[in-house]
Image (cartoon, grey):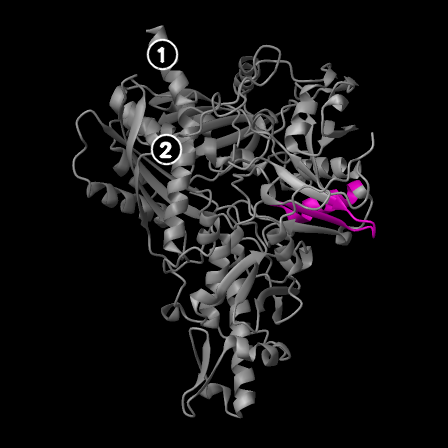
């Protein structure tokens, strides 16, 4: 079929924004040692970095190496630069940095990309140093211009002053002169008592654009001659294409091509609507001989059976087996957690154009730029440096766009490769594609046995986990050590409770259902297990859940700190209302300590209604307290939806039973509780907050529900478990 060259509407604003480069103004070249205390080697070689673009019009644009997905990356990085520069906040702008691993690597991964709440943590000193270097260059430029000593120069809110001679200049006026000065590689950084923006609630830098519609997401991009594509994926995970009849699809007005690619059958058209209609007209036969055809119940039972024996040891202290045999009291519980979808508001989408000069351009919400760049290069047979990744704002991700094997980028590249050079193709996933497309949080089963000594103290913990590995078979497989994927056991293998005899082991399961990290990854299920099992173990000896935790956390001062802070915060609300109960949970993830207390009652259906949540967080220095609180609030809502209602299930035959928000149920706004957040003051370096608000909310609610009703829920989602219990009674 001939490709129509009718031009769709052209987004001039996007074209202009894409055309304005950073060829002018001052770009600071940094040679920074990798100093992230948690993840970087102190002896790592120094690498060049360019993060600040100062224009003569006095605007300062910070190039942010991490994708902005609503977590505040633009604001956080701009804050660090503005403070060290002594800039005025009104000068500050931010944009995504281009894909360049050496310049913009994440020290946690060694590649450009973000995840695991590492963004601010690994960029904190890097961005401050960039700002301080810029400030020193501007001061030196002014001193040279006025023939005075640099020590006589001061800087206030974007203006450089020589007060003795009453001279001053804006940053923009000094930009050209400053740009030719070799930056000092070891500038003096501010002491915390001098911070002007860091630690203060400065306004988010991108709120206005996201509110008035000026912000550009991938779905907003429209380029000349652009084509639109959707892909028909297999009906079962692990199925392959057997046969396709595309005759009727090609008759749909607007369809310009049907092509077989590695992930399915792509339909390309002059509009997304036409592409979807063309896909609906396809007649496809799939080979399911190697596909997952079992139901969720069957898969879960396999996992449950597996946990009856210990797996590969993840951590071991004392002798848990012997201690259980001699314990004065023991308890065993089996927990099941379903597959979960990410369901961000913006589904997967991307634009790819292969140019006649051999270069390839990509526009997408890339969370792992280096991986996506390499994948696209491989598809087109070019070098990675010939692929430009134009990272776009992401309408949420929660891990969905951080694909270790770069599956979506590969699909988008394969689709674009079917078209003539110079023709851009926008690949779109519908909500149904996303919900049914896999890359879920893994289905997981835990079996926990706890024991008490003769004094009633919890002294034994035997824990077996069965789940799929997220990183096995991916470029991140090197994370697996001695057969253990750390993302499967995190939060269980390293919990802070002082229990003398502890053993945690892992069975890594295998099936064709593709899995992916999901907001707070393994902590989403390990926190629930640890905190509900601890709570129940304390309750069985009539130990107060707060005092019992305090005793078990005697060697973990930061855990104790958030525990005490959240108790103090909730106490201000007064006595627990009649018909309500409160539950507590404490959990550390990604270096951030969080404690939450949930207040729960019954709704008209006899299901949990969470009315209030109190949250205390220790994330080190809170660079922007408003963003920290917002991320805790968002994490609570996200986690609450997951434990109450969300699940992906495979029916008989192995097909996904959910498809859209009518059958997959994230939390609705009417169910969002009142949330109060207290930030624990800290002199520690900042850690991430995008994920740590999620893990504690589930067990806090479960502990409150058990206190209220006596029902100990170990099979999620909670609403489903409670309804089943109601039907059984």
Report the number of discs: 2
- Residue 374 left/right relative to 80: right
Residue 556, relative to residue 243: is it above or below?
below
The answer to whether residue 618 shows anywhere in this view is no
Q: Nearer the viewer, residue 434 or 530?
A: 434
Disc 1 is placed on an element classified as helix
Q: Residue at x 62, y 11 (%)?
A: 653
- Residue 523 left/right relative to 408: left
Q: Earlier in the sequence, mark 1 or mark 2?
A: 2
Q: Residue at x 33, y 11 (%)?
A: 726
- Residue 586 left/right relative to 660: left
Q: Nearer the viewer, residue 404 or 163?
A: 163
Residue 229, relative to residue 553: is it above or below?
above
Q: Which residue is mark 2?
A: 669
Q: Which residue is mark 1?
A: 725
Is the residue under label 2 in contact with that under label 1 (CB below 8 Å)? Answer: no
377 magenta-colored = yes
From this viewpoint, which residue is outermost toward the front? 6
Where is residue 500? Give x, y as percent.
41, 36
Q: Nearer the viewer, mark 1 or mark 2?
A: 2
Residue 56, relative to residue 110: is it above or below?
below
Where is residue 659? Give x, y as percent.
54, 22
Where is residue 181? Give x, y as percent.
62, 80
User: Residues in magenta?
Assistant: 353-379
Quadrant location of residue 603? Answer: top left
């Amino acid at each position: 079929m001939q490709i129509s060259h009718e031009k769709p509407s052209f987004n001039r604003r996007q074209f202009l924004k894409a055309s304005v480069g950073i060829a002018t103004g001052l770009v600071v070249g940094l040679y920074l040692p990798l100093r992230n205390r948690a993840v970087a080697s102190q002896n790592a070689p120094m690498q060049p970095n360019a993060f600040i673009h100062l224009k003569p019009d006095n605007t300062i644009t910070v190039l942010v190496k991490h994708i902005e997905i609503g977590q505040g990356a633009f604001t956080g990085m701009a804050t660090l630069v503005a403070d060290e520069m002594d800039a005025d906040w009104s000068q500050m702008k931010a944009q995504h940095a281009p894909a360049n691993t050496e310049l913009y690597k994440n020290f946690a991964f060694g590649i450009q990309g973000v995840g695991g709440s590492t963004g601010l943590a690994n960029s904190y000193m890097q961005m401050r140093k960039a700002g301080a270097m810029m400030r020193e260059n501007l001061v030196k430029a002014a001193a040279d211009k006025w023939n005075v000593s640099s020590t006589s120069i001061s800087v206030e809110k974007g203006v450089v002053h020589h007060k003795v001679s009453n001279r001053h200049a804006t940053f923009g006026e000094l930009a050209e002169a400053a740009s030719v000065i070799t930056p000092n590689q070891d500038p003096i950084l501010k002491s915390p008592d001098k911070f002007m923006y860091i630690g203060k609630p400065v306004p988010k830098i991108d709120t206005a654009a996201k509110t008035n519609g000026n912000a550009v997401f991938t779905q907003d991009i429209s380029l000349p001659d652009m084509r639109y594509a959707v892909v028909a994926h297999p009906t079962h995970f692990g199925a392959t294409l057997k046969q396709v009849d595309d005759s009727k699809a090609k008759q749909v007005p607007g369809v310009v091509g049907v092509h077989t690619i590695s992930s399915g059958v792509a339909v390309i058209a002059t509009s997304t609507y036409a592409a979807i209609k063309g896909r609906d007209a396809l007649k496809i036969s799939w080979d399911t001989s190697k596909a997952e055809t079992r139901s969720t119940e069957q898969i879960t039972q396999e996992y449950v059976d597996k946990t009856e024996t210990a797996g590969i040891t993840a951590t071991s202290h004392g002798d848990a087996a012997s201690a259980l045999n001699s314990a004065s009291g023991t308890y065993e519980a089996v927990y099941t957690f379903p597959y979960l979808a990410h369901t961000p508001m913006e589904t997967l989408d991307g634009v790819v154009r292969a140019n006649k000069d051999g270069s390839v351009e990509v526009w997408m919400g890339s969370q792992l730029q280096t991986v996506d760049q390499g994948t696209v290069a491989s598809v087109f047979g070019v070098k990675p440096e010939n692929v430009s990744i134009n990272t776009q704002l992401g309408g949420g991700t929660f891990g969905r766009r951080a694909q270790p094997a770069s599956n979506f980028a590969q699909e988008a590249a394969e689709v674009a490769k079917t078209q003539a050079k110079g023709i851009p193709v926008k690949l779109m996933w519908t909500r149904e594609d996303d919900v049914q497309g896999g890359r879920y949080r893994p289905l997981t089963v835990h079996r926990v046995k706890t024991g008490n000594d003769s004094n009633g103290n919890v002294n034994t913990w035997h824990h077996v986990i069965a789940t799929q590995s997220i990183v096995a078979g991916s470029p991140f497989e090197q994370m697996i050590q001695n057969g253990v994927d750390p993302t499967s056991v995190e939060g269980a293998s390293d919990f802070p409770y002082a229990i003398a005899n502890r053993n945690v082991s892992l069975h890594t399961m295998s099936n064709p259902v593709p899995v992916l990290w999901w907001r707070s990854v393994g902590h989403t299920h390990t926190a629930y297990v640890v905190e509900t099992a601890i709570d129940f173990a304390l309750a069985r000896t009539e130990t107060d859940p707060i005092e019992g935790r305090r005793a078990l956390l005697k060697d973990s001062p930061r855990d104790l700190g958030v525990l005490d802070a959240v108790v103090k915060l909730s106490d201000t609300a007064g006595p627990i209302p009649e018909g309500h109960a409160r539950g507590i949970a404490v959990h550390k993830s990604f270096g951030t300590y969080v404690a939450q207390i949930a207040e729960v009652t019954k709704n008209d259906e006899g299901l949990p209604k969470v009315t209030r949540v109190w949250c205390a967080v220790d994330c080190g220095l809170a660079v922007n307290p408003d963003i920290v609180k917002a991320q805790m609030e968002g994490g609570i809502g996200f986690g609450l939806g997951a434990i109450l209602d969300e699940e992906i299930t495979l029916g008989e035959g192995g097909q996904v039973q959910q498809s859209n928000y009518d059958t997959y149920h994230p939390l609705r706004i009417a169910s969002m509780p009142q949330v109060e957040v207290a930030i624990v003051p800290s002199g520690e370096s900042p850690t991430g907050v995008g994920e740590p608000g999620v893990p504690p909310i589930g067990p806090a609610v479960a502990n409150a529900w058990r206190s209220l009703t006596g029902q100990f829920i170990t099979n999620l989602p909670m609403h489903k478990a409670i309804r089943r219990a109601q039907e059984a009674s």
